[in-house]
Image (spheres, helix red, strand yellow):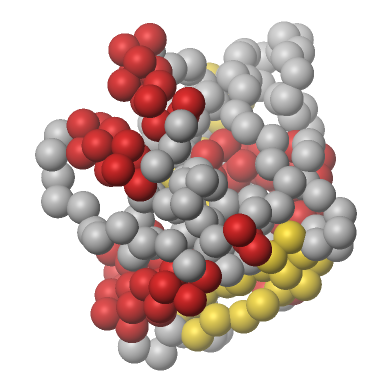
Amino acid sequence: MTATSFDEAYDEVLAANWPAGTTYSQVTTPYGTTRVNSCGPGDAPPLVLLAGGGATSTVWYAQAAHLGRAHRVHAVDLIGEPGRSVAGERPIRTVADLTAWLDGVLDGLGADRTALGGHSYGAWIALHYALHAPHRVRKLVLVDPTQCFAGFRPGYLLHALPMLLRPTAKRTRAFLEWETGGATLGRPGCGCATRQPASRPAARSPAPAPRPRPCAGWTYRPWSCSPDAAGPMTRPASPPRRPGCSRA
């Protein structure tokens, strides 16, 4: 897929599936320029959404209209993943880089304090960010968080192995069809999680970002974790340390 066809598919999803009045911005940080698609009332409380690995911010189309009724929704293209964010001279290599990058994005959006939601890899980033800057996270919603509270089942990894070893659009779609139980998927390139590094435009390929590692020692209640309320997310007195796991 060329850069032109990628951008055309991206715009197609926004035009066909996102609410009327959706706007976009380019937020500059030391790590590059981040594309953010936004909808909802300008004076509503902010909600920042982070997509999973291999996906663009447009995947939130099914939730954008509903969430945009009461929030100013900001869906972010992750640097290092498919989308229209462009890496800068400073690469994102560590969890500290990721949280510093998201600090810059929130600053650029004027979101001093926000609800933060993520799916899969995006949820892993969101959790690390909440631990890094709990004062900036009003609510935290994690959907299928990767390696946050448990590891992968061996059978899941076996199904994913062909895609991980040699990612192609065909292998990715085959894996997603198995993962979703045969659910209907959008056509390749439409912002669904069918874009992999091997098939994204070469100009969008920055240095690899850190990938999820298990963060043991945390307890949680399913669905959402809010720093404002006691109970949903608690840390033990002496949590075990593991590389890649931030402790605020």
Residue 40 image position (x, y, % from top left) = 43, 80
Residue 210 figure quarter: top right
Work out whether residue 119 or residue 232 is closer to the camera in this orientation and state it.
119
Quadrant housing the C terminus: top right
Q: In this view, does 221 lie above or below 75?
A: above
Question: Could you tell me if residue 154 is visible in this image?
Answer: yes
Residue 144 image position (x, y, % from top left) = 40, 35
Work out whether residue 170 or residue 158 is closer to the camera in this orientation and state it.
170
Q: Which residue is drawn at 54% across and 26% down?
A: 148
Q: In this view, does 235 lie above or below 67?
A: above
**Relative horizontal placement of residue 74, taking residue 246 as reference (left or right):** left
Q: Residue at x 59, y 19 (%)?
A: 214
Q: How many labels does the image show?
A: 0
Question: Could you tell me if residue 224 is visible in this image?
Answer: no
Work out whether residue 50 or residue 193 is closer to the camera in this orientation and state it.
193
**Relative horizontal placement of residue 24, taking residue 142 as reference (left or right):** right
Residue 222 figure quarter: top left
**Relative horizontal placement of residue 22, taking residue 184 as reference (left or right):** right
Residue 235 image position (x, y, % from top left) = 66, 21
Q: Is residue 187 above or below residue 159?
A: below
Residue 50 image position (x, y, % from top left) = 53, 54
Q: Residue at x 48, y 76 (%)?
A: 4
